[in-house]
Amino acid sequence: QKEVEQNSGPLSVPEGAIASLNCTYSDRGSQSFFWYRQYSGKSPELIMFIYSNGDKEDGRFTAQLNKASQYVSLLIRDSQPSDSATYLCLSHFGNEKLTFGTGTRLTIIP
Amino acid sequence: DTGVSQDPRHKITKRGQNVTFRCDPISEHNRLYWYRQTLGQGPEFLTYFQNEAQLEKSRLLSDRFSAERPKGSFSTLEIQRTEQGDSAMYLCASSLVRTLQETQYFGPGTRLLVL
């Protein structure tokens, strides 16, 4: 079992709808989680991080963390074509180890 | 632009040659990471430094790979006797460690092609 799992997609969402991206992790010691967006051929760019159970909102983005169920999700409201990218979940295990998921490819359909 | 720079941005080399990549982190950041990413995969951790000390190396990192961060600022990643399987994007990230919140900022990457 991979330590951080994401549905590779592709996930297709109509423009203006809500895109929901999910990530599960295996190590209960994980402390914080990061969502990165990566456009094709580019390096990952940070969208947001979360380390407390519950929701965290930043503009059109909402991160949700449920440590009991060991999942973290990212919601994108009012999806735009520019949101089309691969979204990477990064889990911070304990004090040292950081592990990326394989990413979910999101396509926003105009 | 995150403030992390990498050089070169692209490198084409022949199998068996040595290559060296450089990463300049955000100046106040004390941690520096190297990752490798192949098409369709997430970044794979290779190694990281806290200041000048190399604290962890992935088992993915064979003896042909070596990294340094001699003065706790820039870092170099060298691959000796390159193989075609080394072709990938090599990403550098830096962070400032503060309690639980360690946010990594990535450089633009060095894309390596081994012929």
Image: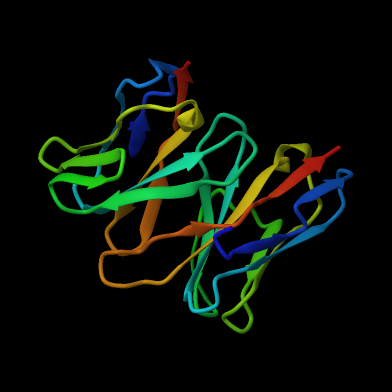
Count of all numbered marks drawn on residues in the image: 0
User: Residue B27's spot in the image, x, y percent?
Assistant: 55, 77
User: Residue B76's spot in the image, x, y percent?
Assistant: 69, 67
Tell me: A64 left or right of A6: left
- Up-down relation of residue A96 to residue B85 (above or below): below
Quarter occupied by the N terminus of chain A:
top left
- Up-down relation of residue B22 to residue A34 (above or below): below
Among the 4 quarters of the image, the one containing residue A95: bottom left
Residues A86 and A94: in front is: A86
Tell me: A79 left or right of B80: left
- Up-down relation of residue B35 to residue A37 (above or below): below
User: Residue, x 64% and y 74% (percent of image)?
Assistant: B74
User: Residue A9's spot in the image, x, y percent?
Assistant: 43, 19
Q: How is the image coloured?
A: rainbow
User: Residue A69's spot in the image, x, y percent?
Assistant: 13, 35
User: Residue, x 21% and y 54% (percent of image)?
Assistant: A51
User: Residue, x 12% and y 47% (percent of image)?
Assistant: A53
Tell me: A23 left or right of B103: left
Among the 4 quarters of the image, the one containing residue B102: bottom left
User: Residue, x 25% and y 40% (percent of image)?
Assistant: A62
Which residue is most to the left? A68
